[in-house]
Image (cartoon, grey):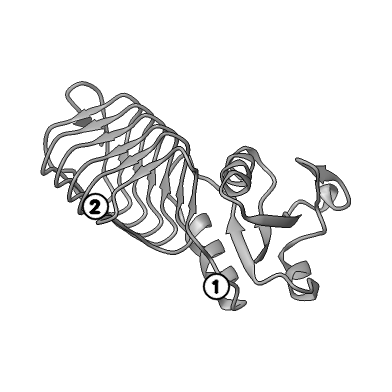
């Protein structure tokens, strides 16, 4: 399996580190920024933008290295474009992550160092479970969501598609976070959050 990394920013660096640690052979990088073409990224050549992928011989796998700090369609659209090329989009899991054998993780998702995913959890497609995040038993995370570093999701939490759980946030057991919602950094969420809402604080309250 030879892989191309899509993206040459900070998040891509962490994806690459996890991929290398788990034995994935990443051979090149693509990035939309024209000024990066021909440069080096963590020892790999940036060969151009996404259009360069079609000419890569022997490359059958892509790793999505574009992160998010808010909700939006960037990662969703990137996933759709790369999936349309017919490349494999595997789960990237750092060896130090703890993942229950009864948890499920969808394609193109990443699980970074020291994250924990407990029994019965269901992780969707193109999800980021970031460094040291905890996803407890029976949590369900929708497609294209991001659980930031150090965030804690208690048992039975539901996170909707495209939502963002901020760094160090805590979501209590059974709470539902709607689609395309944002939970601010360090928030403690005691109640359900509607689709598209933004909450912050301790306890978390709507910013709208």
Q: Residue 33: x, y in percent?
A: 76, 51
Q: Residue 124 sits in which quadrant?
A: bottom left
Which element is circle 1 on? helix
Q: Which of marks 1 and 2 is nearer the N terminus?
A: 1
Above or below 114: residue 19: below
Q: In this view, does 44 lie to the left or right of 85?
A: right
Say few, some or many: other residues with alpha carbon within 10 Å of mark 2 (under 14 / 14 to 19 / 20 or more): many
Q: Of residues 11 and 100, which is closer to you in this image?
A: 100
Q: Residue 100: x, y in percent?
A: 29, 49
Which residue sits at x=65%, y=72%?
60
Q: In this view, does 36 lie to the left or right of 86?
A: right
Of circles 1 and 2, the one toward us is: 2
Disc 1, disc 2: CB below 8 Å?
no
Q: Residue furthest right?
A: 38
Q: Residue 187: x, y in percent?
A: 26, 26
Q: Is residue 43 left or right of residue 66?
A: right
Which element is circle 2 on? loop
Instruction: Quarter of the image for the C terminus: give it.
Output: top left
Q: Is residue 119 left or right of residue 144?
A: left
> What distance separates the C-alpha of mark 1 from that of mark 2?
24 Å
Say few, some or many: other residues with alpha carbon within 10 Å of mark 1 (under 14 / 14 to 19 / 20 or more): some
Above or below 52: residue 193: above
Q: Residue 30 sits in which quadrant?
A: bottom right
Residue identifier under label 2 = 121
Q: Residue furthest top?
A: 202
Instruction: Quarter of the image for the N terminus: give it.
Output: bottom right
Which residue sits at x=13%, y=43%?
175
Which residue sits at x=30%, y=29%?
169
Q: Of residues 100 and 166, which is closer to you in this image?
A: 100
Above or below 194: residue 53: below
Which residue sits at x=45%, y=55%?
109
Residue identifier under label 1 = 83
């Amino acid at each position: 399996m030879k892989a191309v990394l899509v993206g040459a920013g900070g998040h891509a660096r962490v994806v690459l580190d996890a991929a290398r640690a788990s034995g994935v052979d990443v051979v090149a990088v693509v990035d939309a920024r024209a000024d990066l073409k021909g440069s080096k990224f963590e020892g790999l050549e940036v060969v151009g933008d996404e259009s360069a992928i079609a000419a890569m011989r022997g490359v059958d796998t892509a790793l999505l290295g574009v992160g998010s700090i808010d909700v939006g369609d960037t990662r969703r659209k990137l996933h759709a474009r790369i999936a349309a090329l017919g490349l494999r989009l595997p789960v990237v899991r750092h060896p130090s992550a703890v993942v229950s054998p009864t948890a499920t993780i969808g394609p193109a998702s990443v699980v970074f160092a020291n994250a924990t995913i407990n029994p019965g959890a269901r992780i969707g497609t193109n999800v980021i479970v970031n460094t040291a995040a905890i996803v407890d038993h029976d949590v369900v995370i929708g497609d294209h969501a991001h659980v930031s570093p150090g965030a804690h999701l208690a048992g039975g939490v539901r996170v909707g598609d495209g939502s963002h759980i901020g760094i160090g946030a805590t979501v209590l057991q059974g709470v539902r976070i709607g689609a395309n919602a944002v939970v601010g950094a360090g928030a403690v969420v005691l109640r359900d959050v509607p689709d598209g809402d933004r909450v912050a604080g301790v306890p978390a309250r709507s910013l709208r």
